[in-house]
Amino acid sequence: MDHMLQTLITENEKKIVLLVLDGVGGLPKDTDGKTELETANTPNLDKIARESETGMHLPIDFGITPGSAPGHLALFGYNPLSYPIGRGVVAAMGIGFPMKAGDVAVRLNFATQDSNGNITDRRAGRIPTETCAKLCEIISKVNIPGVEVFVQPVKDYRACVIFRGQGLSDHVADTDSQKTNVKPLDPVPTSEKGKKTAEIAKEFIKQACELLKDQHPANAVLMRGFAELPHIPSMKDQFKLNAAAIAVYPDYKGVSRIVGMDIIDGCANLSEQITALKGNWEKYTYFFIHHKYTDSKGEDGDFDAKVAEIEKVDKILPDILALKPDVLVVTGDHSTPAVMKSHSSHPIPFLIKTLNLRPDAAESFGERECAKGSWGIVKTTAIIQIALGYADKIMKFGA
């Protein structure tokens, strides 16, 4: 953050709420040209959009597709290029694993492979978390001399493995090609520093697949996001915010914990998240509320199911507004068009609602309406700065 800006930030009790519909940005699937967000019946979001300032944002830069961790980091006000966070650390921190300096964490996907070793399902049919936990116990038997290996379930088909030992590095490439009907990639070092860890990862995969050979559908593992523990200043230090995260999925608790947010645990759905928000309203000045399933339905290629998830979020808006937040931001961390079944580089719509602003031309909350908005296309890191200003948390500059 710019030093001058940091000197202007001040603390007060005004409340900022950031509501994130993960992967909300989309693309049309039919000739009517409507995206998932434009198709959804969202009377509350549309009404708020008409009373708000709107725009589009880019977490990294034009044409660059962001991952979930960089997308959220940018929403929290941190330049993802200055603070790269590997997927493994996000997964480990999300479940509260006590990582130490020098550890390397890796996001693990249980997957399905055929008799030829080709991956037929990168998510093993989205196995339930209970099955994932049992599989983690099985592959915890992996034994690699000179290295401690910790295998921990995360959620559904996701797990993480943490390697602890001397001379480890996160300079190792993913084994997940993110394609099906091909063999997994080898864990290859991306620099000399990564050679030892790449060999350890290769041995881990070999032993894990042998232990899983009789399991179905999860008889293989894919590794993504080799990562060491980064040092990132907290939101309290950066922005003088007492921040809390209300998320269901562990990964988003992880990236929140990395920037010093308190984690409000015990929520399994939107209703419980709203209850948690109400119950903690007086304790914090910044709330991050996260809804995952807009993204997962997009990755599944299920346009209609993603629309339904957007509509679920729309229904909880009145409960948030009833608390009278001083600033409300609604947006996503990236686009996940169902027609692409993946993240994409398309800009993400956002709205910002507060007492004193200039409502703009947006008539509803959607990509094309927000593109008419007064903020145009901004870098994602600008959103928290705008919110801080509208919450009177940035002092006047100059006489």
Image (tube, helix red, strand yellow):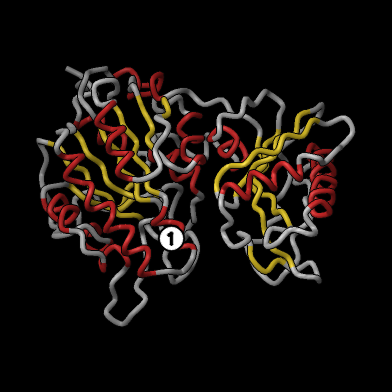
Q: Is residue 291 above or below residue 2?
A: below
Q: Position of residue 311 (x, y in %)?
A: 26, 58
Where's the C terminus, which quadrant? top left
Q: Residue at x 40, y 39 (%)?
A: 247
Q: Nearer the viewer, residue 115 or 286?
A: 115
Q: Position of residue 278 (x, y in %)?
A: 24, 31
Numbered disc total: 1
Dot 1: element: loop
Q: Residue at x 33, y 58 (%)?
A: 309
Q: Give the x, y percent position of residue 129.
A: 57, 48
Please report the residue visible at 10 percent of the width from the left and 44 percent of the height from the top: 358
Residue 93: image quadrant is top right
Would you say 103 lies left or right of 76 here? Answer: right
Question: Between residues 162 and 27, which one lies in front from this camera angle?
Answer: 162
* Residue 197 visible in the displayed image: yes
Q: Amino acid at mark 1?
A: Thr
Q: Split into 4 quadrants, where in the image is the N terminus?
A: top left
For image coordinates 27% across by 24% down, the residue present is 285
Determine whether 222 is above or below 71 in the image.
Answer: below
- Residue annotated with mark 1: 336
Q: Is residue 382 visible?
A: no
